[in-house]
Amino acid sequence: MMLGFVGLAGVGKSSVELVKLSVCKGRVSRARSYNAAVSYKSRLLTSVSVTTPRMAADSSDSKNGQYDYDLFVIGAGSGGVRASRIAAGYGAKVAVTEERYLGGTCVNVGCVPKKLFVYGSHYGHVVEESRNFGWDVETPKLNWNRLIENKNKEIERLNGVYRNIMQNANVEIINGRGELVDEHTVKVGSKQYTADKILIAVGSWPNMPKVQGIEHAISSNEFFFLPELPKRTLIVGGGYIAVEFAGLLNGFGSKVTLVQRGENILRGFDNDVRSFISSQMTAQGINFQFGVTLSKIDKVQTDKEEHYQVELTDGSSVDVDCVICATGRVPKTAGLGLDKAGVKVGSKGEIMVNEFSQTNVPNVFAVGDVTNRMNLTPVALAEGHCFADTEFGGKQRSLDYENIPTAVFAQPAIGTCGLTQEEAEEKYGKENIVIYKSDFRPLKQTIAMGTERTFLKLIVEKSSDRVVGCHIVEPSAGEIIQLVGVAMKAGATKADFDSTIGVHPTAAEELVTMRTPST
């Protein structure tokens, strides 16, 4: 069986470094008043000469009558929609242009459909586990088309929710691809629009390997529209998208091979977590091949079927029905006209911004994955909100990127907040941190008799007793780490954790009962 696909694309989410312009230390704006009755104070760029912006033809539509809009947003993903709604709430005249679908990558081909598929992939082994709990259930049969149908209905509903959010906020939606003409003008199709401020929120795009036969492979964008579940799948890459797809496809019954050029999956995560989750996934039947990657893809036709023969860099080959490349994402800045407006970009095409998401062009801003800071949907939302508060609400705000909780919906899931052990040792010194770890068989598995185990880890800075890192591998890790993030943001110490009464019997109670440091 060889699978074709419906090619759809997304705008949307990969490094955890905050990119700051070395020459851009503050926010620059002109004094303006909106419904919030706020006057803006200028904060000048150091080492940058600011020229008077070109004024567009007079317009009575915007608040100052000089431009068509107070804010023009390119990209209606998470960050763009949040920024436009909040800015409009402050009385700004706002327009958003989007060339594909409302909600960006997360809603359409990212977080939301991925999580729905993760849910769906659990039911097969849940039925198996139920037998030891006394249930006699027939072996379930997957109807892939019904899953795709129901997923599409939910995504369409969410597209409508995003449309209503913007319409209710009096944000004008313009269909088409936005391109900068200059620092105050955006071209969409044959029309041009002027704006006092421009926000770029176009996200990122899958990076496909440049190898022979790559046209036979798909990215995460196309995966959610496959007409059939592949019997055999090759996943190229070792990041969180690759790991999540490997887990859910394995859960649905596909035979999964994951190839990764590095020595392990999830580079940048805590090493104990990396080792633990790879062993868990191996126990579930996922085949890992490390130290190799894609070399060539050939389409093979036999009397019985069509499939792909994939050659790897070590000379070996594997026959599969579907090749998914999860080899990173790049900022989607090509063709945006950034050079025409003089906006600076980095080596990966990311838009360079300061702490207020402001580029080197004072009235042009960028949020979300296109800046390649911390590429997470909630971060893009927060960046968009901070931008709108600062530029239109008179509340100068920038995002604090420390202790942001996040999850990888592997199977079991990973929750992480703060520093890895490796980062903590580098920051504080190995002798100045204390590690607490627990690895155990969860209560459910004592009867279910599955391979799943639970892992928890706390990293504590000695002198302050503050918890500077927390890492969890457990089915509910995403739910647990959200509240751990609140505690860590508040500066919780190990003593605070120790003085908290555990909820019994849960896996999470281990976080407040670990007393013996790991050796």
Image (cartoon, helix red, strand yellow):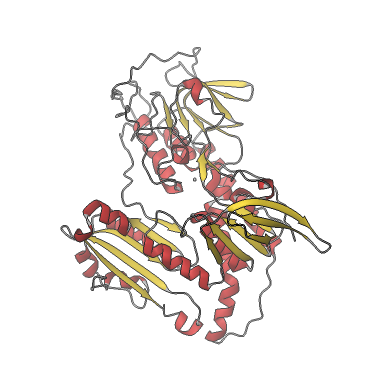
Q: Position of residue 157 (x, y in %)?
A: 60, 50
Which residue is depicted at the point 50% across and 56% down? Answer: 238
* Residue 396 to residue 219: above or below: above
Report which quarter residue 40 is drawn in: top left
Identified at 56% across, 62% down, the residue is 246
Foreground of the two, 208 or 27: 208
The quarter of the rendered structure image containing the N terminus is bottom right
318 to 220, vertically: above or below: below
Left of 74 or right of it: where is 295? right
* Residue, far bottom: 134
Tell me: 244 left or right of 358: right
Residue 157 visible within the image: no
The image shows residue 411 at horizontal and vertical percentages of 50, 66
Q: Position of residue 36 (x, y in %)?
A: 35, 30
Which quarter of the image is occupied by the C terminus? bottom left
Q: Residue at x 43, y 43 (%)?
A: 381
Q: Relative to residue 151, is residue 491 drawn left or right?
A: left
Residue projecting furthest to the left: 463
Residue 113 x, y percent position in the rendering: 57, 55
| Number of disc labels | 0
* In the foreground, 90 or 436: 436
